Amino acid sequence: MSMKIVGISDLAISDDPSDVLKTFSLGSCIGVAMYDPIKHIGGLLHFMLPLSSTAPDKAANRPAMFADTGLALLLTGLRKRGALLSRLQVKVAGGAHMLDQKKLFNIGERNMIAVRKMLWKNSLLIAASDVGGNIPRTMWINVSTGQVVIKHPKGEDIL
């Protein structure tokens, strides 16, 4: 098994059944795993902020930093590898209130709203999620099976 680490503001796509795509430190950031179960193609995005329009220069250099440009990049990459949007299973984790306990900025919530809007525009629904609260998460997807695992301080959950 080959572990491919997806950093913050990054994404990975694979059709290699021996790959596991993994990301760490999902606080207010959100991890989005997508999987085509027929073609066995998986992708994982770890984005920080909802809208690229708030920082166009950063978005030009790091499109995966934002929900709108990162999800567009992930969907394009999956399609190029042969995935069909109509078959994609979407699972989401993160969106916590880590440093914003009084919810002044609501980054986690705003990130989730951006994900839902972008998915809705592409006729996609979230199959499973582990979002909100105030705990960090680690997320990984097994490309051979599409299984998504979320690790948090209380243990692990399979989405």
Image (tube, grey):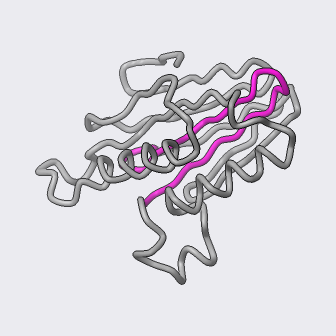
> Would you say residue 4 sits in the magenta stretch?
no
Horizontally, is 89 left or right of 107 in the view?
right
Q: Residue at 61% x, 78% y: name it.
A: 60
Q: From the viewer's side, name the closer residue of 12 and 78.
A: 78
Q: From the viewer's side, name the closer residue of 149 and 33.
A: 33
Q: Residue at 41% x, 59% y: name it.
A: 50
Q: Residue at 64% x, 37% y: name it.
A: 22
Where in the figure is residue 87, as x and y percent of width and height? 70, 27
> Would you say residue 30 sits in the magenta stretch?
yes
Horizontally, is 141 left or right of 41 in the view?
left
**Residue 22 vertical position relative to residue 151 in the rendered view, above or below:** below
**Residue 157 vertical position relative to residue 22 in the rendered view, above or below:** above
Q: Residue furthest bottom?
A: 57
Q: Residue at 24% x, 54% y: name it.
A: 106
The magenta-colored residue range is: 26-49
Q: Quadrant of residue 134?
A: top left
